[in-house]
């Protein structure tokens, strides 16, 4: 019951936040359609609006930890139960968000059928349906199902990424919360490329590039990669939760 109560408590507030994101994107799509149809603006393509959802979920994953873990411990919920409830919450929220993005994609592509100069391409369409000419056909029903699973997998990964960051920096002093991310950025994007080029003739970078191409080969490769990645990141975050002490000063 404690797991169920935790999920219901957190989901209620997070859904309200996502509804706001959904409505903003919905209004932008409709505004773009009206302005294009009335020749206020020229023809164009709205693309990648679902990235806004991904950013929102990344922030949710990072910011929800502090308040939720404190509330859980103060109400006698074990850290293990809290972790399980968080995993369930993330799956439910990812399903809701990917459903919303699929609905927005259907609406955007419906307006595109009026041939009024407005185009709409979701992230899935831009990745898997765009032709060499830069245009993408109207998705089929199967495409929408595939887009749903891809978006759901990416949403899970975004939530898990934010959650890992939130758990990792929770107990750090404010100064280190800035310094440590900067160190990681330097290691990944500056030190690693230099070392890989100097000692391995960039073989690691080429392998990573080949892996990226494999992910882009099909929606199933992408979905599987992001789901596994999300599970791994959630697993890594558990040790940070297991012995965390609550501090109101953080």
Image (cartoon, grey):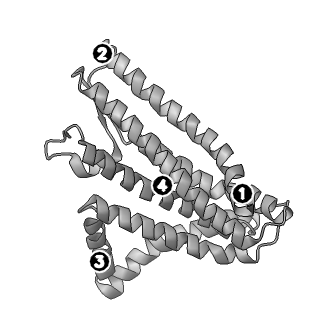
Which residue in the protein does label 2 denote?
A: 37
Q: Which mark is residue 100?
A: none
Mark 3 or mark 4: whose residue is earlier in sequence: 4
Mark 4 or mark 2: whose residue is earlier in sequence: 2
Give the farthest residue toward the front. Answer: 1
**Cα distance, mark 3 to mark 1?**
42 Å
Secondary-structure class at tag 1:
helix
Mark 3 and mark 1 in contact? Answer it, CB < 8 Å: no
Along the line of sight, which residue is nearer the eye, 80 or 169? 80
Mark 1 or mark 2: whose residue is earlier in sequence: 1
Q: Position of residue 197 (x, y in %)?
A: 33, 80
Which residue in the protein does label 4 denote?
A: 155
Pick the quarter of the image with the C terminus.
bottom right
Query: What residue lies at 21% left-to-right and 45% top-to-bottom?
Result: 130
Mark 3 and mark 4 in contact? Answer it, CB < 8 Å: no
Along the line of sight, which residue is nearer the eye, 160 or 250? 160
**Cα distance, mark 3 to mark 2?**
47 Å
- Mark 4 is surrounded, within 10 Å at the Cα level, by few (under 14), some (14 to 19) or many (20 or more) other residues, namely many
Q: Position of residue 46 (x, y in %)?
A: 34, 34
- Mark 3 is surrounded, within 10 Å at the Cα level, by few (under 14), some (14 to 19) or many (20 or more) other residues, namely few
**Cα distance, mark 4 to mark 2?**
33 Å
Q: Nearer the viewer, mark 1 or mark 2?
A: 1
Residue 78 in view, yes or no = yes
Query: What residue lies at 74% left-to-right and 71% top-to-bottom?
Result: 79
Q: Which mark is residue 6?
A: 1
Residue 247 in view, yes or no = no
Which residue in the protein does label 3 denote?
A: 207
**Cα distance, mark 4 to mark 1?**
20 Å
* Residue 110 vertical position relative to residue 7 in the rendered view, above or below: above
**Cα distance, mark 1 to mark 2?**
47 Å
């Amino acid at each position: 019951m404690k797991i169920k109560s935790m999920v219901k408590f957190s989901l209620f507030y997070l859904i309200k936040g996502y509804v706001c994101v959904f409505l903003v994107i919905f209004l932008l799509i409709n505004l773009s359609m009206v302005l294009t149809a009335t020749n206020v603006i020229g023809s164009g393509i709205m693309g990648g609006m679902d990235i806004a959802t991904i950013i929102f979920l990344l922030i949710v994953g990072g910011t929800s930890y502090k308040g939720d873990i404190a509330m859980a411990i103060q109400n006698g919920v074990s850290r293990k139960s809290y972790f399980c409830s968080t995993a369930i919450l993330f799956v439910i929220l990812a399903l809701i968000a990917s459903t919303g993005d699929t609905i927005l994609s259907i609406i955007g592509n419906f307006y595109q059928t009026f041939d009024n100069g407005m185009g709409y391409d979701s992230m899935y369409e831009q990745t898997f349906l765009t032709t060499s000419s830069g245009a993408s056909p109207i998705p089929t029903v199967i495409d929408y199902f595939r887009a749903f699973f891809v978006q759901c997998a990416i949403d899970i990964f975004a939530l898990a990424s934010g959650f890992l960051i939130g758990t990792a920096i929770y107990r750090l002093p404010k100064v280190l919360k800035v310094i440590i991310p900067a160190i990681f950025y330097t290691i990944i994007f500056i030190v690693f490329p230099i070392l890989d080029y100097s000692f391995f003739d960039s073989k690691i970078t080429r392998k990573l590039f080949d892996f990226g191409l494999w992910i882009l080969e099909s929606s199933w490769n992408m979905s599987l990669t992001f789901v596994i990645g999300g599970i791994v990141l959630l697993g890594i975050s558990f040790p940070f939760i297991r012995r965390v002490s609550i501090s109101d000063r953080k």
